[in-house]
Image: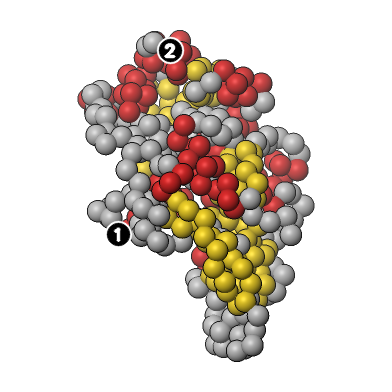
Amino acid sequence: MAGENEEAVRNKQVILRDHVSGFPKDTNMELRESTMKLRLLEGSNGLLVKNLYLSCDPYMKFRMTKPDVPDYVQAFRPGSLITGYGVARVLESGHPDFKKGDLLWGLTGWEEYTLITAPETCFKIEHTNVPLSYYTGLLGTTGMTAYAGFFEVCSPKKGETVFISAASGAVGQLVGQFAKLFGCYVVGSAGSKEKVDLLKNKFGFDDAFNYKEELDLDAALKRCFPEGIDIYFENVGGKMLDAVLLSMKLHGRIAVCGMISQYNLEQPEGIHNLTNFILKRIRMEGFVVSDYYHLYPKFLEMVLPQIKEGKIVYVEDTAEGLENAPTALIGLFSGRNVGKQVVVVSHE
């Protein structure tokens, strides 16, 4: 526990400088250096951790916007530390579920060292025969999001048709592979030729198209799904969602994971084809991954053998160093990343 003569260490941190309006910019964030003592206070049940990997996720933009967002968004304040999901090693523990040297994933700070005051939100990493960075994505919230959205929200049946927007992104690439392994016909959209090739040749999608080259999204979807779409995994919103509604089958299901095309607009786009919900009895449901954390053991039971057997292909886009974290996060909104965007804080 902390003593008065305990030597303090330097701790680099990423701070929100001011609220984001429109597209986030490098100037919205800044790197600062503080000091902290690497000891817990007497009686603390927290964890002192060294951060190894950080996850860049689109939802973080919501927390960086103006303070009129709902309370449950837990917005960052200017001058405050940015937080998100990451992988860390425990330096000292006041919690019975963790001990010094344990690896964990969960909510942590965008900094070198973090005092985690709610260890119950963290998961101990038991399986270390895979890259640790996978716990920022495939074996963390990204994989759980893909699993919960596809299997729990959409209730798929073998042989059904599945469309995924932003399919080369961290979640999309996994939904597509889960759907293929389950026995579905899978098509994805992405924003470059490189990403389309990745979907078809690396991730095993049945088909894919570059939405930027399609003058008519409705025609593109009807070309890929002449019989219609059973399941749409929604990551984009806007014009894509509007076009998808025209191609949904009777009793189709839509899992709303994200709407990245809308996040940076001052005035969100409207949806016009809503009568299809009635005519086709479509069910559309938004979801948040934390509602499904109780299924994490079941998820690992499914995905770990698939990784071991080489059935899952996983692509990461890695940025080295905490100082490059803001640029890495901003890149999500222009499609700069290919696969899961990870920031390496320390190789230990």
Q: What residue is shown with label 1?
A: 71
The answer to whether residue 298 of the structure is visible from this angle is no
Q: Which amino acid does label 2 sit on?
A: Glu
Tell me the crowding category of disc 2: few under 14, some 14 to 19, or many 20 or more residues within 10 angstroms, Cα based: few
- In this rendered view, identify the residue nearer to me: 145 or 226: 145
Which sits earlier in the primary sequence, circle 1 or circle 2? 1
- Say which quarter of the image contains residue 212: top left
- Give the residue at x 37% y 19%: 247
Q: Is mark 1 on a helix, strand or loop?
A: helix
On residue 214, the disc is: 2
Alpha-carbon distance for marks 1 and 2?
39 Å
Image quarter of the N terminus: bottom right
- Give the residue at x 64% y 65%: 50
- Give the residue at x 64% y 54%: 345
Residue 142 image point, x, y percent: 54, 45
The answer to whether residue 41 of the structure is visible from this angle is yes
Q: What residue type is labelled 1?
A: Asp
Q: In this view, does 239 lie above or below 122?
A: above
